[in-house]
Amino acid sequence: MLPEIPLWVKNPDYDRIDWLNRFIQLMWPYLDKAICNTVKNIAPPIIAEHIPKYKINAVEFETLTLGTLPPTFHGMKVYVTDEKELIMEPCIKWAGNPNVTVAVKAFGLKATAQVVDLQVFASPRITLKPLVPSFPCFANIYVSLMEKPHVDFGLKLLGADIMSIPGFYRVVQENIKDQVANMYLWPKKLEIPILDPSKQVFAIF
């Protein structure tokens, strides 16, 4: 079987970024902790907004680590604009070994679900804006998906692999793709504040 042709070979608009993959590989133990802490901070309000329609009282992380295998960038497109912003569209593929355990509380009961063997293929648009003269030199990160992501994973409920139930696997996969797309498919976006605008001087001298 022939190896997959990298995106930067097939599409000249995408740049080769082997250096970034090497950087992420070396920094992954630290990025893992930083990303997980960020997820723990931004996830609760998003979860709280969507769980009432499923009659769920709470969803809480019991364990959250991204594992030892970092994602790989297969190319990146960078847009030049006249605004104080930086727009990037990386092609990300991640076949990871995370350990994500969440507790779901509903109807007075508690169930534990564990996500394992996660695979994600996505092409997000990442916008850093506005650019400012204060480190890290941008005030917000905006993330949108340019197309529905490919998401594949194992799911254990109370220790049993429920993804092996006939028909359940496809229903779960398609539902997750649709829900993620409904929330973050462009032009919708996830906003991650980095700097407090009220305390920054945005004029670039």
Image: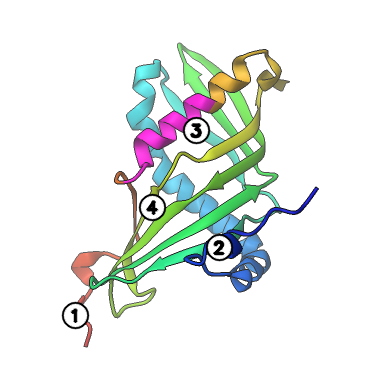
Q: Is residue 59 left or right of residue 119?
A: left
The image quadrant where one finds the C terminus is bottom left
Residue at x-position 35% and y-position 61%:
127
The local secondary structure at tag 3 comes to strand
Depth-wise, is mark 1 or mark 3 nearer the camera? Answer: 1
Q: Dot 2: few (<14), some (14–19), or many (≥20) neighbours within 10 Å?
A: many
- Name the residue that disc number 1 marks: 203
The local secondary structure at tag 1 comes to loop
Residue at x-position 56% and y-position 54%:
92
The answer for how far apart the CA atoms under marks 4 and 1 are is 24 Å
- Name the residue that disc number 3 marks: 60
Q: Quadrant of residue 173?
A: top right
Label number found at residue 143: 4
Q: Amino acid at mark 4?
A: Val
Depth-wise, is mark 2 or mark 4 nearer the camera? Answer: 2
Which comes before the other along the chain, label 2 or label 4?
2
The local secondary structure at tag 4 comes to strand
- Name the residue that disc number 2 marks: 75
Residue 122, given in percent of the width and then of the height, sits at 52, 47
Q: Dot 4: few (<14), some (14–19), or many (≥20) neighbours within 10 Å?
A: many
The answer for how far apart the CA atoms under marks 1 and 3 are is 41 Å
Majority secondary structure in the magenta region: helix
Which comes before the other along the chain, label 3 or label 2?
3
As drawn, 81 above or below 150:
below
The answer for how far apart the CA atoms under marks 1 and 2 are is 32 Å
